[in-house]
Amino acid sequence: LACRERGELKDDVGIVVASGGNAGLANAYAATEVGVPATVFVPETAPAVKVMKLWASGANVVQRGAEYSEAYDAAVAYAAETGAVYCHAYDQPEIAAGAGTIGTELLEQLGEVDTVVVAVGGGGLMAGVAAAVEGRAKVVGVESETTPTLHAALAAGTPVDVAVSGIAADSLGARQIGRIGFEVAVRTGVRAVLVSDEDIVAARSLLWEQYRIIVEHGAATAFAALHSGAYVPADGERVAVILCGANTDPATV
């Protein structure tokens, strides 16, 4: 909608986004709502369940490269060639603001909380939530120790490239945290904690076995911080965990 208001959106080519799958689904939905086509570039390693959902949403799906960064390069080239509006999966103000509505809704539904725990990949969700709850709650950003974009950026004082691997890389597979995510994390004092693949698998299994909640590994990463003890709340601390992402094959739980 913002692109249409600025006169940037072309009805014949629409939008293009690079995604591990989830951001692509959101963009495809938005494109359908405004009546334009959506092209989504995903890595060749994207889970089949996400690719199928993208096709079902009406998106044109193109698989390129072994990881998100390669799909991103291909999507940017496609935008330059066709005139489609490129929508960044996480490092764009409108995208981060949209994700931040989760934080707003959380406070409206739960009232006051002390801490919000959220998974971090490229940092769009974390940035939006941290901005939304700023001054009312602190944010803990949880990431896989195999792809520590936020942790590495905070240590270096600037976003830096990291290796991309691990069980949650299909949704938390950014090579570098976005500039918006980094700046918001620094400004709001987001704490970064790391969890292992084993922690993520255990947390995902527990969510199903005890609560009958099915999530993908990226979403389970947030809960893994509590389940593994990577983050230990103080006595009486009111903690909310955002489980964002259930685009997974239930047979793998």
Image: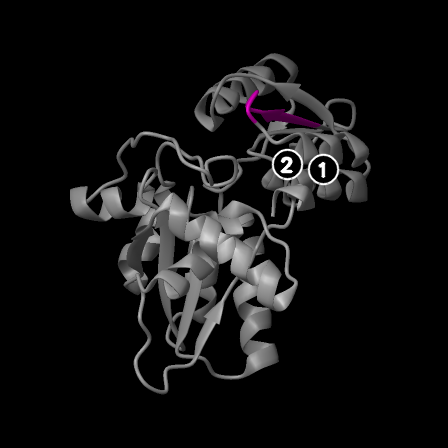
Give the class, few, some or many, for how many residues have Cα within 10 Å of label 2's Cα (few <14, many ≥20): many
Q: Which residue is drawn at 60% across and 48% down?
A: 253
Q: Give residue 24's mark.
A: 2
Residue at horizontal 61%, vertical 78%?
109
Picture coordinates of residue 113, whole percent (x, y): 45, 80
Stretch in magenta: 39-45
In the image, 58 versus 36, the foreground residue is 58
**Given contact means CB atoms under 8 Å apart, are the residues at marks 1 and 2 in contact?**
yes
**In the image, farthest residue toward the left:** 156
Please name the residue that numbered disc 1 is placed on: 28
Image location of residue 215, percent across then percent down: 60, 52
Total numbered badges shown on the rendered structure: 2
Task: Pick the residue in front: 12 or 220.
Answer: 220
Residue situated furthest bottom in the rendering: 236
Tell whether position 44 is magenta.
yes
Q: How far apart are marks 1 and 2 (CA)?
A: 6 Å
* Amino acid at dot 1: Ala
Give yes or no for residue 142 being in the magenta stretch. no
* Left or right: residue 58 compared with residue 40: right
Q: Which mark is residue 3?
A: none
Give the amino acid type for the residue marked by disc 2 in the picture.
Gly
- Provide residue 185's location: percent of width, then percent of height: 32, 56
Res. 101 in view? no
- In the image, taking residue 101 as reference, residue 119 lies left or right, namely left
